[in-house]
Amino acid sequence: MTLQDDGGRPVTLPALLDWLNDGEELAFIDIREEGLYGEGHPLLAVNVPYSLLETALPPLVPRAGTRVVLLGDEADVTARAIARLSALGYDRLYFLSGGVSAWEHGGQPLFKGVNVPYKAFAEFVEHLLHTPDITPDELARLIERQEDYILLDSRTVEEYDRFHVPSAIAVPSAELLYRFDDLVPSPETLVVVSCAGRTRGIIGAQTLINAGVPNKVVALSGGTQGWRLADLATVRDDARYFPPLSKRAQQSSAERAAALAQRYGVRVIDAATLGQWQSDPQRTTYLFDVRNHDEYLRGHRAGARWAPGGQLVQSLDKWAGTRNARIVLNDNDGIRATTTAHWLLQLGWDAVVLPGFDAADARPVASSPQSLPSVPVIDAHEASRRLAAGALALSADRSWDYRLAHPAGARWVNRSRLTDALPAVADTAAGILVFAGQGPLAEGVARDLIAAGYDAKRVSGSPQDWRAAGLTVQSSPQDPPAAQQIDYLFWVHDRHDGNAAASAAYLAWEADLPRQVADPAVAHFNIRR
């Protein structure tokens, strides 16, 4: 199979650079595994590992007619990716000639880490708007003296529950302005916004400043990592969460959000406009519900994906892969959607607000990708019988999960390097069984094996199910070796596990991003002073 056999067309580096700035919709997709992507990738490339391509790409690129450029490091993997996406109905597929090497040899920079544009954005915000901060030692003195302050932890509740700075209250970013008057009744109280590192603390503090709250607001320098680096202890046992919303807090946040919308040009649309946009086969429209998860589960607009507002600002590439698409932000009253939209606009995205929801307003989305037929699936009991008859076992789990638990005798494979495993399975007459606790990983490997002419089946279930069927499940702490773990980003991976050097390196990396990016316009930022 060649790169053009299944509809892919080459694009040169100069042409791709033009496309990144032409204002038209473009999905620039890096199909390498996460470890390779995290060690160095183009600034605006979105990571969709080939191992999860068919399940991960459609939510990120929901319109089949989107112009898609794939970036890889192996021509055969890129060719298979084009074939799979063609089968899903994507019909404007391109690949960068020469792959990652062509990008780098063409003088274009590669960036370490993940969510890089959004972390860089926060650093530019701090530099340009002079977002004030407070050091961990200064905050520790306030806590010790019981002075008039409040510490708001803007991370997700799940992150907060794992550990947090003493006295912190869990208030995810999108809730900060919404619940401000309930949390901070006195204008004299110093407001400190914290996160895990720098990004959400800066954005959270600047959100309140932009909205005009009367208090002095600062970001905790370095967040929980900075706190630990100052040799201060985090805690778990004094958890506090934001209170129910009062009418007074809702009214005041609505007034501040309205002023924010006017200042930053946040537009509001109605359900009829959303319906028209969703029916347009020439444009992509994302619909995100930015409320907290409990509210979303109690009821939401049909077709809306849950995406908490603060997380969108710090990691939009987890939800949206098509640049220059429309983003519609939905909540019950428009307040949290407005605070989120005012940042996405400055990030260079076309974001609007749609308050309220009604399932009757749902419209079919034009030009959606198709679904691929499922590969054959068997359960663990049938797998046990077939293994006894001589079938070969492969594990397509993430490498770290394979180290923790896999069927005895199962060889680890990664879909992006599947050709490396083919010589070992060439003489298998009893079939190949592909295990993975995450089903789509096994599905992808089985699909590629079937396409290559092998008799392959996916085994359903988890390690617990495999054990229950009588299979021996074992661990292998050193296998696969680190050099083969292309799906795992080792760079400062243990910064939240007490590795002070990793935390210091990570915080320094975040603070250095403006120097690396150099010009905010390269990332399409439009930060309002």
Image (tube, rainbow, N blue to C red):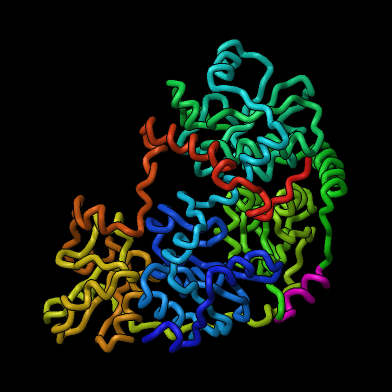
Q: Is residue 316 above or below residue 429?
A: above
Figure quadrant of the C terminus: top right
Q: Is residue 129 left or right of residue 65?
A: right
Q: Position of residue 432 (x, y in %)?
A: 22, 79
Query: Would you identify the image quadrant in which residue 457 lies?
Result: bottom left
Q: Is residue 498 above or below residue 47?
A: above
Q: Position of residue 271 (x, y in %)?
A: 81, 69
Camera-side residue: 412 or 42? Answer: 42
Q: Is residue 519 left or right of residue 374?
A: right
Which residue is drawn at the image coordinates 36% and 71% (left, top)?
A: 74
Q: Position of residue 10 (x, y in %)?
A: 50, 79
Camera-side residue: 193 or 168? Answer: 193
Can I make out residue 509 in this image?
Answer: yes
Q: Position of residue 526 (x, y in %)?
A: 73, 50
Type of secondary structure dominating the magenta stretch:
helix
Q: Is residue 12 left or right of residue 40?
A: right
Task: Indicate whether residue 398 is drawn in magenta.
Answer: no
Task: Indicate whether residue 278 is drawn in magenta.
Answer: yes
Query: Would you identify the image quadrant in which residue 322 lies?
Result: bottom right
Figure quadrant of the N terminus: bottom left
The region drawn magenta spans 271-281
Q: Is residue 445 above or below residue 104?
A: below
Q: Is residue 334 left or right of residue 195?
A: right
Which residue is drawn at the image coordinates 73% and 46% (left, top)?
A: 527
